[in-house]
Structures are given as C-alpha cells and as structure tokens.
Amino acid sequence: MNFEQINLHLEAYKEHDQILDAAKYLIHSFDLEHENFAGFGFREELSPTSMLLTAEGELGGPQTVMIPRNLFDFDLNLVLNMVAHEMLHVRQKAPGQVVEDKNEREFQAYYEMLFHKVFPQVPEVSDFHKKFFGNKALEYYRRMGEGSDLQQKYAVEKTEVEQLINSLS
C-alpha cells in the first residue's frame, strides 16, 4: 500500500473519531509493532500547533503509548516519526533489552528520527524538524555527563548528528 492510500485510510478513521484505531493502523502499515507494546491511550493535547507522545509503563514491562486526540491534525511524516520515536522506547523498555539510562534512550530515539536505522520505512521530516530533533539528541548527549562512558559509546553518532545539523544550516 502506498503513502497516499495510507493517508486516505487515516482520514477515514479521523472522520469517524477513531483516533486509537488510526494509530494502530499506522504502526501496522509501517511495521512498527513490537511484542512489548500494550496499546495506545489518550493524553491531553498540548495545543493545536504542538504535540507530545509518551511511552508509559515500568522498565521491563509492557508499554502504552499515549497520544493526543489531535495527533492526525499534524503532517503525517512528522506523526510517523513521533510514533516511531515512542515505538523505539517500547523496544528499549522490553524485557531482556532494557536501556536503563533515560538520556541514552532519548538520544537513541532522536538519533533514529534523523537516520532511520531501526525503522528505515519511516519517511524523513522537514529540515526544520531535523534541526529540532538533532538539537534534542545533542541535549540528551550532554546530559549523559562530560566524558562519561555513555558519551564515549555514542561519540560517532553525536558527530553524525552535528554534521547533519551543520549541513542544514
């Protein structure tokens, strides 16, 4: 199924106020599903111009991805990247593969939004959003602690993020 057909299906779900079903359809269509995923739930909308998604649940336990009701009012490429970010958290918190450090989880997820190594089927976002996500990745990298083992572990990826940001400026 192509992107336009997927968008038409999402619009139909949205017209019938079936937002959770639309989100399930989206992760199925883009092969983002994972056995640690417990489903979607609603969270409060931030505003008509911004959105926040979260993966909620104990580390090592099933994760519920909380989405705003207005999720599908945004650009589909952006929505897909935001959902993929949370679905990466679902994997990071799965039994047997828990990434303990929040800064590491967030760095990995923002890195994924830029380079799509785990989810290559997810489309790219605008340069504006790439810069934003790149800067968020660098922020979490800084929070790992100057010269820490975690920073050393992700030094190559940090350089990739910096190069991408610089190429967009």
Image: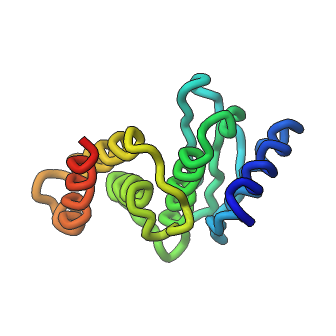
Between 4 and 6, the one nearer to me in the picture: 4
Can residue 18 be seen in the rendering of this structure? yes
Q: Left or right? Give the position of 1 relative to 81.
A: right
Can residue 24 be seen in the rendering of this structure? no
Up-down relation of residue 38 to residue 130 (above or below): below
Between 37 and 101, the one nearer to me in the picture: 37
User: For the image shown, how many numbered marks are present on the structure?
Assistant: 0
User: How far across and down, in percent of the image, does residue 150 sit?
Assistant: 23, 63
User: How far across and down, in percent of the image, does residue 46 sit?
Assistant: 57, 26
Q: Left or right? Give the position of 132 relative to 77.
A: left
Q: Residue furthest bottom?
A: 96
Between 87 and 113, the one nearer to me in the picture: 113
User: How far across and down, in percent of the image, does residue 101 sit?
Assistant: 35, 58
Q: Image point 18% across, 64% down: which residue?
A: 155
Between 56 and 30, the one nearer to me in the picture: 30
Up-down relation of residue 76 to residue 24 (above or below): above
Q: Image point 15% across, 60% down: which residue?
A: 148
Q: Image point 59% across, 63% down: which residue?
A: 61
Q: Residue furthest right?
A: 16
Q: Image point 70% across, 38% down: which residue?
A: 42
User: How far across and down, in percent of the image, does residue 88 sit?
Assistant: 51, 61
Q: Left or right? Give the position of 123 relative to 2.
A: left
Q: Residue furthest left?
A: 147
Up-down relation of residue 70 to residue 163 (above or below): above
Q: Quadrant of the C terminus?
A: top left
